[in-house]
Amino acid sequence: MSQYARINSVALLKLLKASLATFSDTAAVALDEVATDIQRTLAWLTEDRRRYWTEQVRVCRERAVQAKLALKQKQVLDRALSGTTSSAVEERKALAIAERRLHEAESKLARTRSWILQIEKLQSDYRGGVQGLVSAIDADIPNARARLDKMIDSLEDYIALAPPETPADIEKTAIQSVLRPEPEPDLQNTPKKLRDKAPAPKVWAEAPLVSKPPEWISDIALPDMGADPDVHRNDGSAPAPDDKVLVACVEGVPDVAFLVRAAGGDGDSGWFIGAETKTKGYVAVRVADLVRAAAQLQDALSLPAGSLVRIDRRQATATVFDADNNVLSQIPAPTGQQR
């Protein structure tokens, strides 16, 4: 096995480190919630229900004894007064009711004790089943993040050792920086706000798959980013035609739309297309169907995981951010798209 790795982007390592932290936090919260629910149920059964039905059995047993005594006294009294044994209908009814309630209380107590034993066993099985995940959260993931920190620091130090720019490179960079429009003042906080709009993984899994994306997608005015030298893409970043893209359903054509890419899985491109306006729901669209309806998005879909593209119709600009929310480029956007 090769002992070397080919690293194309330090930003991806940072994204992986952040994703590990997110997974660890989410999993820890889920484990705590499940453990709390189990413990709460067990405490309710042992401290509330078992105590209650134990007391009910005691009370019902005393009432049954009293009912038997009342029946016996009635029979003795009638025999002494009339010389015959009385039917004692009321006393017999009271005894039957007392015995039935005693039986019900004993049955409930036995069932409660059975539930306690079952839940204690399930609790033990659950703890054994999640022990591997607990170990990963407590040790494996922190160790992995620490190793990633070292890798990132080493790679950044290595990149810093790159040869200095030649005068021609400096002149070219200066010209490009002058010609490129200045980013909007509020762009510093914009990436985080847009990334926070990406739905939870459960939404990605449950979104219905459609063959035609929402109509507003075809109106996204996105320029050809292939001509911009500051927008870097990996050759292996382009999604497969059958990979899915999650798309928000909104009313009308939003003034601000955005594309953000997470680390996808099998059959999932990781791309989410949303807007700053209120979302009514979500659908999943295959890459091939999306590009067929909105060909202007094809070039952007090749950006690597962690990328964010913000398209502002009012400013007629498309701003590209990397995984660290640095502005890679701000490109003048077309005023519209042909349907």
Image (cartoon, rainbow, N blue to C red):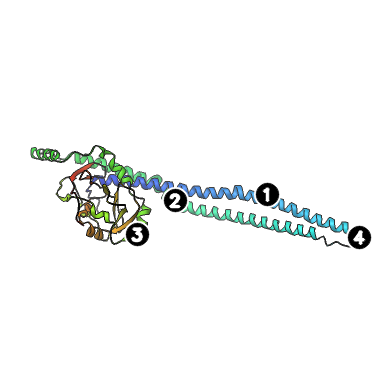
Q: Amino acid at mark 3?
A: Pro
Q: Position of residue 297 (x, y in %)?
A: 22, 54
Report, in whole angstroms, how far the alpha carbon at label 2 lies from the one at label 1. 39 Å
Q: Earlier in the sequence, mark 4 or mark 1?
A: 1
Q: Residue at x 78, y 53 (%)?
A: 66
According to the picture, the residue beneath numbered tag 2 turns out to be 131
Q: Earlier in the sequence, mark 3 or mark 2?
A: 2
Q: Amino acid at mark 4?
A: Ser
Q: Closer to the camera: disc 3 or disc 1? A: 3
Q: Closer to the camera: disc 2 or disc 1? A: 1
Q: Earlier in the sequence, mark 4 or mark 2?
A: 4
Q: Which mark is residue 82?
A: 4
Q: Which mark is residue 119?
A: none
* CB within 8 Å, label 3 to label 1: no
Q: Regarding mark 4 in the picture, which secondary structure is present there? A: helix
Q: Amino acid at mark 2?
A: Gln
Q: Regarding mark 3 in the picture, which secondary structure is present there? A: loop
Q: Which picture quadrant has residue 331?
A: top left
Q: Earlier in the sequence, mark 4 or mark 3?
A: 4
Q: Closer to the camera: disc 4 or disc 1? A: 4
Q: Regarding mark 2 in the picture, which secondary structure is present there? A: helix
